[in-house]
Image: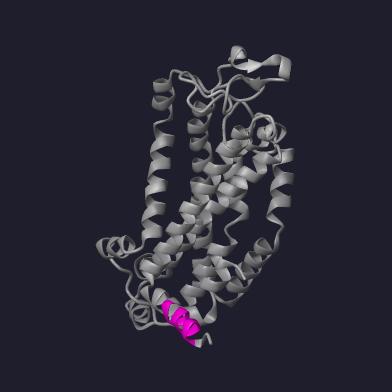
Amino acid sequence: MTTSDVLAAPGAASDTPEAAPGARQLWRRLRAQRAALAGVAVIVLLVLVALAAPLLAALEGQDPDAYHASAVDSALGGVPVGSFGGVSADHWLGVEPGTGRDLFARLVYGARISLGIGLAATVVQVVLGVAVGLAAGLGNRFLDNLLSRTTDVMLALPTLVFAIALLAIVPAGFPRPVLLVLVLGLLGWGGTSRIVRAQTLSLKSLDYVAAARLGGAGRWRIARRELLPSLAAPVVTYSALLVPSNIASEAGLSFLGIGVKPPTPSWGQMLSSATTWYQADPTYVLLPAGLIFVTVLAFTALGDGVRTALDPRAGTRLRAVARGRKGARP
């Protein structure tokens, strides 16, 4: 069962929605969760590193695309000279095997591509999913059935296979980061649509929505002023879980050689190049893989923290279940 199925389950949608907490109350609840705070700190740090990539590379004095033939041993096939992948005062994290390009500069510039694709693809997914879900929930029976079946088809599609096919037939001159955002966004909105539709069907039967309808408000006004504020909680929670999924998808597609193309640096593309060097230079494999792992873990912890902050009853239920299991032990 996927996250979207859990959030869109009938039992969860039938509960009377509570008012979403304000920003201060949400932050206060998040501060009580150490894992979520750690996730926020890591994400903020990564975003700052991505934004300051030119400054950090200039501080080191290296260019991400500059080759350094003297930093690799051509007699050994291009293995970096020195320990830990060629770490030195000039190359803080070593160099790329075979080319001698500075690894620190490529990692900080790669953060721009990997984080940018993950966040932008999530925005596309959320916009499309909210639009389709609202239209299905507020539309007539024919429109609801049509959009619901379309959503089911999108969820059933083998996303990876279709992404590989689309990326393979697009001309090489088309910007790969933009193409990855479009492919991931256009193929991944089904989960958000299902959640929004389920919540819309539950919300539109409540008194304040009925009062707005009796007052002459149209469907667009009801959706914008009555439904969207109440839909913010599940949408934000699911969005926080979509970002790491998209980052991992970009890394996987680049690893397969159909994502970001060199010399453009991205963590997935670097990991793809590192597969032939894992024995001679394990540092080149561990650094991009570790960054991907930490980023996915941070966004996952943040998403779980936001879910608990927006629905404190979830944390209470989990603690009750844990106490019940502990008490049931012999």
> Which contiguous range is marked in magenta?
319-327
Give the residue at x 45% y 58%: 301
Q: Nearer the viewer, residue 133 or 274?
A: 274
> Can residue 201 be found in the magenta stretch?
no
Give the quarter of the image for residue 223: bottom left
Expressed as whole percent of the image width and height from the top left, the position of residue 50 reads 44, 36
44 shown above or below 22:
above
Expressed as whole percent of the image width and height from the top left, the position of residue 52 reads 39, 31
Give the quarter of the image for residue 82: top right
Considering the image in quadrants, where does the N terminus appear? bottom right
Q: Nearer the viewer, residue 75 or 121?
A: 75
Magenta stretch secondary structure, dominant: helix
Q: Residue furthest front?
A: 330
Expressed as whole percent of the image width and height from the top left, the position of residue 108 reads 48, 32
Give the residue at x 40% y 34%: 51
User: Does residue 258 show up?
Assistant: yes
Give the quarter of the image for residue 203: bottom left
